[in-house]
Amino acid sequence: MKSIEIDDLYFEQFIEYDQIKKRIRLIGIDLNVKYEDKHPVFLGVLNGCFMFMADLMKQVHVPCEMSFVKLASYHGVDQGKVSELLGVGMDLQGRDVIIVEDIVDTGKSLKHTMDALEALGVNSVAVCTLLLKPSCLTYPFDNIMYVGFEIEKEFVVGYGLDYNGQCRNLPDIYRQVIK
């Protein structure tokens, strides 16, 4: 099993790229069926989604559009509070939107994104996430429709996920191990 070290933290290979590709292929099939007669907008949440979204869009064969957003957070007193959705760049009113996330952990940023989209008057919102940590969710969601893998409360890197800006480029996903 492959392992890596980053800043005195150790990680072991957790999900191989071949497994990721197979799961994305299945998600793509589901999306193609569900959105066959629609013209959805795939909205990727940066930075972590870029590898997942690139591979996902290769499996989506229905007419669609895509855009990326970035969440801005307050610093200081309300540190960690999501404050703004940056970069939508298109009119989403009345559209079917699929939020593409690398990971849904507590759901805090996802809830903010969904609230912002609903305020823009979208027709529907579905969530497509590579990783989901069900035990960490602090909000109830009924529209997380497409999940690559459910994982436990683990610290993971690779395939778009980073630690201090590092490891986003790794094709596999690694989880932290305590030595």
Image: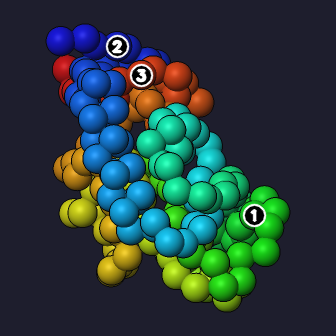
Image coordinates of residue 138 in percent, x first then y, are 34, 74
The residue located at (34%, 13%) in the rendering is 4
Residue 84 appears in the picture as rendered: yes
Image coordinates of residue 90 in percent, x first then y, are 80, 67
Q: Which residue is mark 3?
A: 171
Q: Nearer the viewer, residue 176 or 157?
A: 157
Q: Which residue is mark 1?
A: 88
Q: Give above or below for 130 relative to 69.
A: above
**Front of the two marks 2 and 1:** 1
Quarter of the rendering occupied by the N terminus = top left
Under mark 1, the amino acid is Val
* Cα gap from disc 1 to disc 3, whole angstroms: 27 Å
Under mark 2, the amino acid is Ile
The residue located at (31%, 20%) in the rendering is 10
Lower position in the chain sequence, tag 2 or tag 1 = 2
- Residue at the limit of the structure toward the front, as seen here: 37
* Cα gap from disc 2 to disc 3, whole angstroms: 13 Å
Q: Is residue 124 left or right of residue 11?
A: right
The residue located at (25%, 31%) in the rendering is 19
Judged from the image, the secondary structure of the residue bearing numbered disc 1 is loop
* Cα gap from disc 2 to disc 1, whole angstroms: 36 Å
Image coordinates of residue 107 in percent, x first then y, are 42, 67
Disc 3 crowd, CA 10 A, few/some/many (<14, 14-19, 20+)? some
The label shown at residue 4 is 2
Image coordinates of residue 136 in percent, x first then y, are 28, 63
